[in-house]
Amino acid sequence: MPANETATELLRATRIAPSILSADFARLGAQVDEVIAAGARVIHVDVMDGHFVPPITMGPIVVSALADRVHAAGAILDVHLMIERPERQVAEFAKAGADSITVHAEATPHLNYALAAIRDAGVSAAAAVNPGTPVGALAEVGALLDMALCMSVNPGWGGQPFIAASLDKLARLRGLLPSTAIEVDGGVDAKTAGPCAEHGAGVLVAGSAIFGAKDPAAAYAALAQAAGAV
């Protein structure tokens, strides 16, 4: 089964992807509506299991709760699995309405299998590498990747400062996978968004820089302008 064509097409453009990890969960739907109205078309969902990373966040039920309103607005759900053995959970997240699913190269001994399972579920497939993992970890699975994610902080916590060496790493990742969408996640704000885009990132995940602001829609617009995003 081919990957989600709508998601794959949206991820090819330069975009800011608001991460709901930093949203106010008492009014999650309203905050998602607000950034979509401001132009967001990729909503990032950070899933953590308390094992691969210390925190525990959310699961398929949150994806399912958001799916209809996000899809009705012409946007997609970009689900980032920071969990051990992610291949075991792919089917549930696909069923819940995920359009793109990212698994970590460090989280499974069967990365090829995990990515194939995502694509078989009709979802766009992505793989992430942590700050200490070489980009070459993705070299053997390039044919299965719709997107590659470069972590620019250590995964698990929002609000961390951007790791400056990530810019060179983004450029190396772009060189390794010239026809694949490149995503960056961690410490993205109005100062780092432009350099990230210049070094090869197309999809820029931002959590606290958007939902931690008094006006998330205005913060989204500022980041989009800084990155030259659509």
Image (cartoon, rainbow, N blue to C red):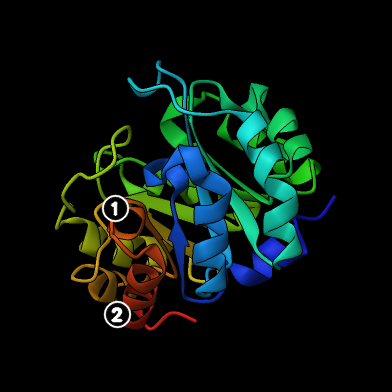
Query: Identity of the amino acid at label 2?
Result: Ala
- Crowdedness near tag 2: few (<14), some (14–19) or many (≥20) residues, C-alpha within 10 Å: some
Three-letter amino acid code of the residue under disc 1: Gly
Position in image of residue 77 (x %, y %): 62, 52
Q: In the image, 190: left or right of 77?
A: left
- Identify the disc placed on residue 212: 1
Q: Are marks 1 and 2 in contact (CB under 8 Å)?
A: no
Q: Residue at x 35, y 24 (%)?
A: 53
Could you tell me which residue is drawn at 33 percent across and 73 percent down? 223
Residue 201 x, y percent position in the rendering: 38, 68
Residue 54, percent across and down? Answer: 32, 20
User: How many numbered circles are shown?
Assistant: 2
Q: Nearer the viewer, residue 51 or 211?
A: 211
Q: In this view of the protein, which residue sits in the foreground, 84 or 205?
A: 205
Q: Is there any visible trace of residue 89 in the rendered image?
A: yes
Task: Identify which residue, 17 or 84, lies in the foreground.
Answer: 17
Q: CA distance from mark 1 to mark 2?
A: 18 Å
Q: Which residue is mark 2?
A: 226
Dot 1 falls on a residue whose secondary structure is loop
Q: Residues within 10 Å of mark 1 (few under 14, many from 20)?
A: some
Relative height, residue 165 to residue 12 (above, below): above
Residue visible at 37% across and 60% down in the picture: 173
As helix, strand or loop, the secondary structure at mark 2 comes to helix
